[in-house]
Amino acid sequence: MDISYEIATNIDLAGAKERFMGNEGLFKKFLLRFPQENRYGELKKQVDENNAEGAFQVAHTMKGVVGNLSLVAVGDVLNPIVEVLRAGSLPQNEQMDELEKVCTHSLEIIKYIEEHDVKLF
């Protein structure tokens, strides 16, 4: 895995640096919490139970966390799902599968960042 490429395509580091006022330590502190705050499992449960309103609440919260952490790859897949749910519909299985895939990949990148103490900015 070319970690520099993977980080650059999954995390908007320039946006994160600006949002966290250049404080890499603070950014990493919040980024490393994402594995506990990743609500994909809860979102999937709500979708599987055909609960569009509950799924919207979970997805909207997740969207805020992802946005604050500049996890652009997750956001690019999650944002259309939020809009489907906002309209009262449920996302397609393919959308949920893609979200699971991108969340899993982002978690792998975050784990690598933590294990190797990667300098981000």
Image (cartoon, rainbow, N blue to C red):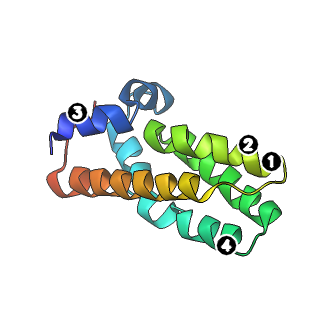
Question: Observer-nearest residue: 121 or 113?
Answer: 113
Q: Position of residue 50 (x, y in %)?
A: 76, 70
Kindly check if marks 4 and 2 are in contact, taking CB atoms under 8 A apart as contact: no
What mark, if any, has residue 5 been given in the picture?
Answer: 3
Q: Which residue is found at the position 40% from the left and 50% from the top?
A: 31
Which image quarter is the N terminus in? top left
> Does residue 14 lie above or below 32 as drawn?
above
Cα separation, mark 3 vs mark 4, equals 34 Å
Q: Which residue is mark 4?
A: 48
Nearest to N terminus: mark 3 or mark 4: 3
Nearest to N terminus: mark 3 or mark 2: 3
What mark, if any, has residue 86 been given in the picture?
Answer: 1
The amino acid type of the residue labelled 4 equals: Asp
The amino acid type of the residue labelled 3 equals: Tyr
Query: Which of pointers 1 and 4 indicates the residue nearer the eye?
Result: 4
Kindly check if marks 3 and 4 are in contact, taking CB atoms under 8 A apart as contact: no
Quadrant position of residue 93 = bottom right
Total number of numbered discs in the rendering:
4
